[in-house]
Image (spheres, grey):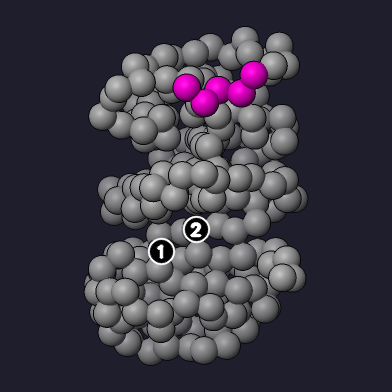
Amino acid sequence: MSTFTLLLGGEVIHTPRLETQVAGTRVIAADSGIRHADVLKLLPELWVGDFDSAPDNLPLHLASVPKQRFPAEKDSTDGELAVSIALKHGATRLNLVGAFGGARADHAFLHLALAVRLAEQGIEVLLSSGAQEGIPLLPGKTAAFDYADGTLFSVLGFSNLDGLTITGAKWPLTAVEVPFGSSLTISNAVKGKLEMALGSGRALLLAHPYPLPES
């Protein structure tokens, strides 16, 4: 297995869990995502993008990372370009770090949908901000997760879902149909060993391994 961590432009916080997930991986930064490198104690082997949002005054060890520049007017985002480059370098597993939040909701949506498509192509994908993480669910497979009791999670559907089963949860489900756009699978909590199975459809688990800040 060849694992690449791609540093994207969304928000990232350092957590021990995230540090463990990215340790020992190959790293590519996408434009402003390079600002996460020092936070996670990573040194990218490549920095890609049009650099329209590249941070100023980077330390020398980051400013000197080899660059692959693309025109500002292009058909792919910097994040998708980073994914393509990682796959060309033999990636079979991807950590998309900084995939959520930030100023661009459209980019966040793209990363979620792209992760589902990549999973359908046989690429293992983890999306993470440190505080929350996403994992695509594949039809016909049972997925098990290591989250502690009380961990908040939701299942995001990108289509109608059929045969969704959730065990090890406060509100378990057994082979249910979930219409596209339903809130049925939003805001559940782990209770035991969380496992999920999906009959058909496109979906992604979104979990919060660390408690949400109180409002």
Q: Is residue 171 above or below residue 53?
A: below
Q: Is residue 86 visible?
A: no
Task: Determine which residue is flagged by label 2.
Answer: 134
Element type at mark 2: strand
Element type at mark 1: strand
Q: Bounds of the magenta span?
A: 52-56
**Amino acid carrying mark 1 in the image:** Leu
Choose between 161 and 90: the one closer to the eye: 161
The total number of labels drawn is 2
In the image, taking residue 121 as reference, residue 3 lies left or right, namely right
**Amino acid carrying mark 2 in the image:** Gly
Residue occupying the point 49% across, 58% down: 134
Q: Position of residue 180 (x, y in %)?
A: 27, 74
Q: Is residue 55 above or below residue 100?
A: above
Task: Determine which residue is flagged by label 1.
Answer: 204
Q: Residues within 10 Å of mark 2 (few under 14, many from 20)?
A: many
Residue occupying the point 53% across, 37% down: 9
